Image: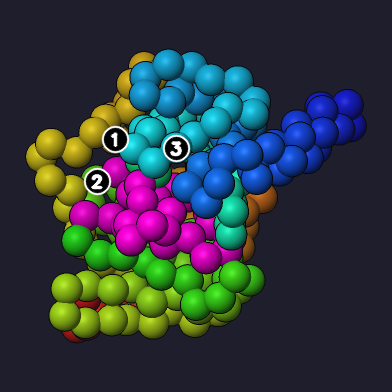
Amino acid sequence: MKIRRSILAMGLVASMACLPLLGTSGAILSPMAGTVAVNGLPVTAGSAIVAGDLVSTSNAGSARMVLPGGSVIAASNTNFRMVSVNNANQIRLNSGLVKVTGLLPVAVSTRTIVPATASTSYSVYDLSGKVYVEATAGSVAVKAANSTFTVHTGEAVSFSDPQAPAAASASTGASTLAVPVAIGIAAAAAVVTGIVVHEATKCSNCVSSPSQL
């Protein structure tokens, strides 16, 4: 276990060193468990990611992505696209769970979750259009077309935001529907180790479907 952690740590250090070569719109992706694919093709540690690339993890997979200004941990059965909006990186989450640190927004179908500061840490989970957002450090703003709902440290919100019928699906052989996974402070440890647990639908501290959303 210590050897595996050392190898992973060395890989992440090497990945960080490569970031300046990618500029402000690139990222480095490293599988943490199982199969991780970019645009349908399996990748290895230290793979370069650019705007437009589609990332998907298998039902036993997980991955970490580092980029200027933030990092992302993707749980199993997660599918997202890295996009550039107004020359800034953004994650468009199609399904699954991502844990984000830094100034990196996450967009779902019609809402965008925007962190307040570079030290903000939060999770977004989309299960077939049922979305859960939790702020574990700092606050995030869940922005709809004409309103905003703020989620503060230790708070969570859930709301319905179905994807369009043409939303991309995972291409690694995993189910096209995300399995229930953890949300909350415990989720961080669960995702890091690639473990998937059923807690999102038991989100006892969630504000459910606030009027602003």
Badge 2 is on which residue?
128
**Amino acid type of disc 2?**
Ser
Q: Are marks 1 and 2 in contact (CB under 8 Å)?
A: yes
Tell me how many marks there are. Answer: 3
Q: Earlier in the sequence, mark 1 or mark 2?
A: 2
Q: Secondary structure at mark 1?
A: loop
Would residue 84 be seen by someone viewing this image from the given angle? yes
Q: Secondary structure at mark 2?
A: loop
In the rendered image of this protein, does residue 9 appear above or below residue 60?
below
The residue under the point 31% across, 65% down is 112
**Amino acid type of disc 1?**
Leu
Around disc 3, counting alpha carbons within 10 Å, would you say few (fewer than 14), some (14 to 19), or many (20 or more)? some
Around disc 1, counting alpha carbons within 10 Å, would you say few (fewer than 14), some (14 to 19), or many (20 or more)? some
In the rendered image, the quadrant that contains the C terminus is bottom left
What is the distance, in whole Å, between disc 1 and disc 3 at their CAs? 25 Å
Q: Position of residue 166 (x, y in %)?
A: 13, 36
**Amino acid type of disc 3?**
Val
Q: Earlier in the sequence, mark 1 or mark 3?
A: 3
1 relative to 40 in the view: left or right: right
- The magenta-colored residue range is 83-109
Which mark's residue is nearer the viewer, 3 or 2? Answer: 3
In the rendered image of this protein, does residue 114 appear above or below residue 46?
below
Q: Which mark is residue 50?
A: 3
Q: Position of residue 25 (x, y in %)?
A: 47, 47
Q: Earlier in the sequence, mark 3 or mark 2?
A: 3
138 relative to 128 in the view: left or right: right
The residue under the point 42% across, 58% down is 88
In the rendered image of this protein, does residue 41 appear above or below residue 181?
above
Q: Main secondary structure of the magenta part?
A: strand
Residue 106 magenta-highlighted: yes
Quarter of image, res 89? bottom left
